[in-house]
Image (cartoon, rainbow, N blue to C red):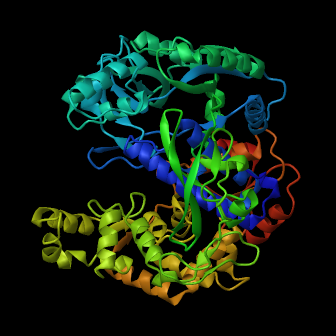
Amino acid sequence: MSDPATLTPAEAEAELATLAAEIARHDRAYHEQDAPLITDAEYDALRRRNAALEAAFPLLVRADSPSRRVGAAAASGFAKIAHGVPMLSLDNAFGAGDFTEFCDRIRRFLGLKDEALEFVAEPKIDGLSISLTYENGAFTRGATRGDGLVGEDVTPNLRTMKSVPERLNDPHPPARIEIRGEVFMTKADFAALNEAQEKSGQKIFANPRNAAAGSLRQLDASITATRPLSLFAYAMGEASEKVADTHWHWLKRLEDWGFTVNPLSERLAGAEAAEAFQARIAAERAGLAYDIDGVVYKLDSLAWQARLGFVGRAPRWAIAWKFPAEQATTVLEAILIQVGRTGALTPVAQLTPVNVGGVLVARATLHNEDEIARKDIRVGDTVTLQRAGDVIPQVVAVLTDRRPANATPFVFPTTCPVCGSHATRAEGEVVRRCTGGLTCPAQTEERLIHFVSRPAFDIDGLGEKSIREFHAEGLVRSPADIFRLPAHEAAIAQREGWGELSARNLSAAIRARQTIPLARFIYALGIRRIGEANAKLLARHYVTFANWREQMRAAATIGSEARSDLNNIIRIGPAIADELIEFMAEPRNLAVLDDLAALLTIEDAAQAADSGALAGKIIVFTGTLETMTRPEAKARAEALGARVTDSVSKKTDLVVLGSDAGSKARKAAELGVRTVTEAEWRALAGME
């Protein structure tokens, strides 16, 4: 895999697009279907490559970047529970260097110098994350992680587990406390379960993690009750009161309340102690009763955890140091070309299935035509799949000594394999794209599938298969046609596999989605580089659909106030702004927008968090802050519902002046924008 520093921006952009799609596919398989397509090490390496590219090309970070997303949406078979505090994921380390950099980031963010960093190390269990809520000591509800914001209500299932206390062992429990942990299955229990499943002719589970997740996510809790599930508790979510000063103290409270905490957990001082612990646990790993794939290291001080907060999908105060994985060799049987909703032609290797770490791998990304040419990858080659530290599954080497005599260099197509249109490659870019646009069935279908996906309109009963069928028969040619399907309910009921009840349910599901929040609407449009995170940023900034549409059109004029306002949104860079403007410049896209607007109620976005003390305020920080770092100040402002921008305008509400404040302070004075000192800012932010 090429060093990110050697890539052009166009090459990096193409690879990031491929990674985003690949990781999203694996998220759905893992979290929604309990059927991962690749190993954890393969998945981790996908994310690591994505992070490396984003670090090298920060302006190319996608709105749908995996670094901004956790898990997958809650399954439709369960009631949904919104988490009071998001259940996010963890960034990964793969060696001592990564862990040292993690420590350095903590020091930079908090402005620390010689202060010691103490951590709590906990073996990383390969199971299913859950949240348990206790009110006045009584267990009231439990949920899976889901997408980190909303999970599945599995309370009845959790009540069947002996390791989940019905009441906390405490005469004076907190009024409300959310306890988080991992449901898992031991290796011995997994083997016994599979043996019983096989004897009864039922489904055989691929690994203990799948068995645990499948057992807990049963619609019939009596089935869960028969499964040998275990629980390790380790984290705190929403709490009505302070219950500990350190994470180590928190683990002791969990034990006192009746939970099982991993007995291998230890409190450590510094990176050297962490490295030694990592080596010891790696050596003991094979003999443990349960599967682990690494060790989680958490900063022990809860006060420092609170200051550090979160970035994207992960906390700044914790990291998962993963164990190294394996390589495998197999035969590349074919090179397939997939066409995405933006027209990108992506090559995929079809492999002779190979068992890598207990999971059959049958496909691997080849990224782009340059990568194929550089590695001289040919059909029939025996190839090596790299697992840890690189894109996974990914072909990293060709064993040319095993190459068949008749293997010929692969010729990348110059026409779309779906519609036959020319596939062109713009100067400076690595991706070849179909020019068929909305006339290309692949692009149209992929856009429609994206439109009804869970993060978008989330229409029950209208999945990929139905969209492809309806599109092929002309029932759905544009997004607005989806909302006209109820008029065809009788005809749909006559289709194979449908019937009156399912057709009626589909019509009801479509009508239920005719009211949608602005952020989901923007995301559903499938604009290039606009994923969930950036859709939320745009919705929050522009508030109403009419205002967003108008301002995007106005932003087409270079030098306009609307263009400046768009570029001033933190995390909306020039490349993203150009995509938005280009989308709005296309008359056919505007026609789609107007057609949808006539059929839908697009809800205004809240300008900021409801509970934020600075909700809706636009804040600029300038000068040198003495009592906190700039990243910490920005994180605190955003946590309170403010929007932090880089330049002062008449829309700015507040400018925080550090020492040596310069041009921004003068601009604020000229415009009459309120300014405050750092001390006054701390008081406003509740940090005194």
Indicate the quadrant where residue 225 lies.
Answer: top left
Left or right: 280 in relation to 270:
left
Total number of numbered labels? 0
Quadrant into which the C terminus falls: top right
- Residue at the location (56% across, 21% down)? 123
Would you place residue 511 above or below residue 132 in this image? below
> For the point 45% across and 21% down, which residue is it?
233
Q: Residue 117 appears in which quarter of the rendering?
A: top right
* Location of residue 207 with respect to 512 vertically, above or below: above
Judging depth in this view, the residue of 534 and 368 nearest the camera is 368
Residue 663 x/y as whole percent: 85, 64
Most distant residue in the left direction = 500
Please name the residue shown 68% across and 86% down the image.
Answer: 557
Residue 494, above or below 235: below
Measured as percent of width and height from the top left, residue 641 is found at: 56, 52
Horizontal and vertical percent position of residue 322:
63, 30
At x 51%, y 14%, the residue is 288
Q: Which sits in the foreground, 246 or 147? A: 147
Q: Is residue 685 visible?
A: no
